Image (cartoon, helix red, strand yellow):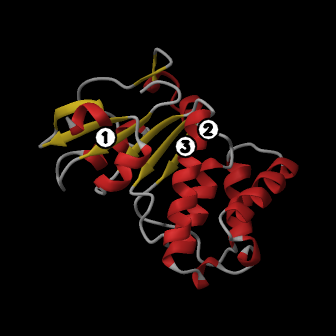
């Protein structure tokens, strides 16, 4: 994937999508092959590589006793961000995703969609170079999904590298520049959305 590209990663259940995501995020070491970022094997300095990655997992595992803002502050500090920068970026993104009125509410009281929005904000808080979305629209309402699609387009314009793992072909068609289709762990198709349509 090149800067500015949005790569859709599609395939039926069991095709290897989640395994690929775990390998690309550095959560799992590949049994064969390598992942390169800017020409360097990510395993050479995994901590430095992870600092450049924003990841939205499929499952929203959050700390329910924290408020949304407290969770974002925790994530920002773990990323080495200053408190001022955390406050500025969190405030702007909470407003973008209509979460600002709920910033002091405990995550335990959030709906599934609200939790998903907090995950999205947390993944983008440190302005990563590579953004990995694993079924990011899970639980989002129509408005949030539209905001998310606009956000992906903006990240692409900024030159971010975006890996978008999904089952939803319709959304992939709207936001992705390129698509890979997997079946049983093998790549069976690759190309631009237009190429694959034809």
- Image position, residue 37 (x, y; %): 47, 23
Q: Secondary structure at mark 1?
A: helix
**Residue drawn where x is 75% and y is 71% of the image:** 100
- Dot label at residue 128: 2
Count of marks overlaid on the render:
3
Q: Secondary structure at mark 2?
A: loop
- Image position, residue 79 (x, y; %): 68, 45
Residue 52 visible in image: no
Given residues 181 and 110, the one toward you in this image is: 181
Marks 2 and 3, how far apart in space? 15 Å
- Dot label at residue 12: none
- Image position, residue 158 (x, y; %): 63, 33
Query: Is 79 situated left or right of 25 in this image?
Result: right
Query: Is 112 situated left or right of 176 in this image?
Result: right
Q: Answer above or below: position of 45 versus 91.
A: above
Query: Is 73 situated left or right of 64 in this image?
Result: right
Name the image quarter holding residue 106: bottom right
- Image position, residue 17 (x, y; %): 27, 46
**Residue drawn where x is 49% and y is 67% of the image:** 61
How dense is the environment of label 1, judged by Cα within 10 Å: few (below 14), some, or many (20 and up)?
some
Q: Residue furthest left?
A: 184
Q: Secondary structure at mark 3?
A: helix
How dense is the environment of label 3, judged by Cα within 10 Å: few (below 14), some, or many (20 and up)?
some
Marks 1 and 3, how far apart in space? 23 Å
- Mark 1 vs mark 3: which is more N-terminal? 1
Q: Check disc 1 and report the residue beneath it.
A: 20
- Dot label at residue 153: 3
- Mark 2 vs mark 1: which is more N-terminal? 1
């Amino acid at each position: 994937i090149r800067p500015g590209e949005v790569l859709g990663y599609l395939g039926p259940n069991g095709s290897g999508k989640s395994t690929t995501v775990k390998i690309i995020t550095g959560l799992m070491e590949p049994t064969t092959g390598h992942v390169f970022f800017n020409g360097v094997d990510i395993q050479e300095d995994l901590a430095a590589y992870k600092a450049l990655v924003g990841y939205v997992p499929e499952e929203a595992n959050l700390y329910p006793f924290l408020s949304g803002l407290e969770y974002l502050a925790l994530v920002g500090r773990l990323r080495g961000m200053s408190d001022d920068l955390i406050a500025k970026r969190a405030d702007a993104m909470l407003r973008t995703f209509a979460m600002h009125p709920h910033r002091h509410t405990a995550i335990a009281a959030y709906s599934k969609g609200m939790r998903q929005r907090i995950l999205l904000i947390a993944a983008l808080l440190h302005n990563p170079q590579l953004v990995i979305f694993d079924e990011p629209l899970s639980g989002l309402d129509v408005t949030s999904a539209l905001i998310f699609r606009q956000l992906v387009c903006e990240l692409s314009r900024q030159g971010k590298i975006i890996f978008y793992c999904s089952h939803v072909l319709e959304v992939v068609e709207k936001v992705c520049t390129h698509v890979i289709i997997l079946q049983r762990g093998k790549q069976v198709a690759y190309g631009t959305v237009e190429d694959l349509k034809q």
